[in-house]
Amino acid sequence: MSGDLAGLYQQVILDHSREKHGFGLAPTADASSHQLNPTCGDELTLQLHATDGVIGSVTWEGAGCSISMASASLLHDLAPGLTYDEARERIALFRELMQSRGAGVEDEDELLGDAIVLEGVSKYVARVKCAMLAWVALEADLAQLDAAH
Amino acid sequence: MELATPLADAEVLRLRRDFPALNQQVHGRDLVYLDSGATSQKPVSVLDAERSFYEHENSAVHRGAHTLAANATELFENARATVARFVGARENEIVWTSNATEGLNLIAYGMSNASLGRGGADAARFVLTEGDEILTTEGEHHANLVPWQELAARTGATLRHIPVADDGTLRMDEAERLITGRTKLVTFTHVSNVTGVLNPVDDLVRMARAVGALVVLDACQSAPHRVLDLAALDVDFAVFSGHKMLAPTGIGVLYGRAELLDALPPFLTGGSMITTVTLEASGYLPAPQRFEAGTQKVSQAIALAAAVDYLSSVGMDRIERWESELGARLVGGFSAIPGVRVLGPGTGVHRAGLVSVDVDGVHAHDVGQFLDDRGIAVRVGHHCAQPLHRRFGVTASTRASAYLYNTTADVDAAIDALAGVRAFFGASS
């Protein structure tokens, strides 16, 4: 196994891909979005539960590769307690991290928590979409809440 | 008839020197290229043919009186003759397209235009109307499904499909039931790009002929790999792509029986495909020119002929037998790995040299990434065949596909790597 592969599939990622924190949809949600990666068929529905502009939790269901599943699981751990703007800031930073081609971004540890283990994905352009799937879903959820206001 | 001697590893290793792209390392390992079902690598003779055209003959074909134009036209039309011989066709039955997808759309839009009244009485056999049926299969590449969905929507015809059995073969009992007097067109792939199944062309042609339906054959996975005689198969139309058979991208072939091509209304119209043009209306040349509007893919067609020459010099019968051996080795090795399910026919069934698998507990993208780390290139995803994957209860699979430049060592490397996948991803339990 090469160092790159070990960097991509860190143990934390493999654990999250199996444990899937936040897996299972709630009967209702404040916002919900369904995302599809047409090239590989990965699918994910992500619900947002919020109170007074603060995220309470995200719940999700989906089927896909270990990167997309781990990413949704890590997002579930990160999101609670964030305001909408803070969540948007983190989504933007995570996107920047994914597009960094292995270079990383500033403040990633502080703002992204355990999700920085996905940094290795940025070296694999073809897999960036997998890692982004849940984050794009959360972005769409936030847009729905904006539109409702 | 005496069977041809298949290729063998020593000869394959010599052939491989003709393919520069195969001589490289990926992640510090020698490249093992098992993705020829998606696109093939190119020998130096093909690269040289394209370059040489631009260095010597480059000019517009079918026009101009100067020497370069005459030489270019001769090479272009010689290429057509070479490809025609390769698939048992006549020159006027070979239409250049960009790829197989364009060829299938050409037929669909030609029929669409006929259904709008274009082409007059000669085109009556292509007219579709409400109550007519187009029959495809559950196992098609999207290219041989979506254009027919669109054609049905435009004409009011109904699209039906022959289901696929658990072993990946077509349900021929269902085909018997589905092919009726309402069926106007039957279209199917020769070799499945997912399962490697060889469909029973003779039986389907016989059934279609009995009801007067047209037959379209998707030969994308057969023309590059098998001896192909389209006239003997007695299909009406066939398509294939150059890039899957050692040629560059941007060139494909539509075969059509001459009397059908001359009656089918054109798809793309414009320069080079006309007889007399007035401000109001135009007359069209016979096939193949009536389907070749605008500047043609000249260097690519010439390179495709060089690819066909390369394949012919090795011998398609020998390539076919070699890939059959590699396919059997792949399916045997993959089937023996715990937690690996082969989609389609298992061991002991004659197949093409490609095998797709589902790995229990590991997504295809992760499988592909793990193999890539060992320098092994395979295809992951739905291979442009979502309905067939749905049929097998999966959204994606991992496909290894061999060609004449693959050795048994390549196959064994893929088997060995696949055997390590579930443990790496913790899916062993």
Image (tube, grey):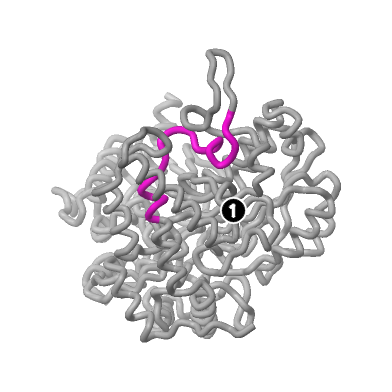
Q: Position of residue B345 (x, y in %)?
A: 63, 74
Depth check: give the residue in front, A58 or A103: A103
Judging depth in this view, the residue of B151 and A40 nearest the camera is B151
Which quadrant of the figure has residue B36? bottom left
Task: Let me know if residue A58 appears in the view.
Answer: no
Q: Name the residue carrying label 1.
A: B90
Question: In the image, is residue B68 part of the stretch drawn in magenta?
Answer: no
Determine the residue positioned at 65% across, 30% down.
B113
Q: Is residue B302 magenta?
A: yes
Q: How many marks?
A: 1
Start-end of magenta stretch: B284-303
Q: Where is residue B155 in the image (x, y as percent from the top left)?
A: 71, 32
Determine which quarter of the picture holds residue A7.
bottom left
Find the residue positioned furthest to the top.
B279
Which residue: 26% across, 72% down? B23
Task: Answer with the quarter of the image where residue B84 lies.
Answer: bottom right
Q: Mark 1 lies on which chain?
A: B
Q: Where is residue B52 in the image (x, y as percent from the top left)?
A: 27, 53
Instruction: Using the image, determine if residue B348 lies above or below residue B151.
Output: below
Q: Quadrant of the N terminus of chain A?
A: bottom left
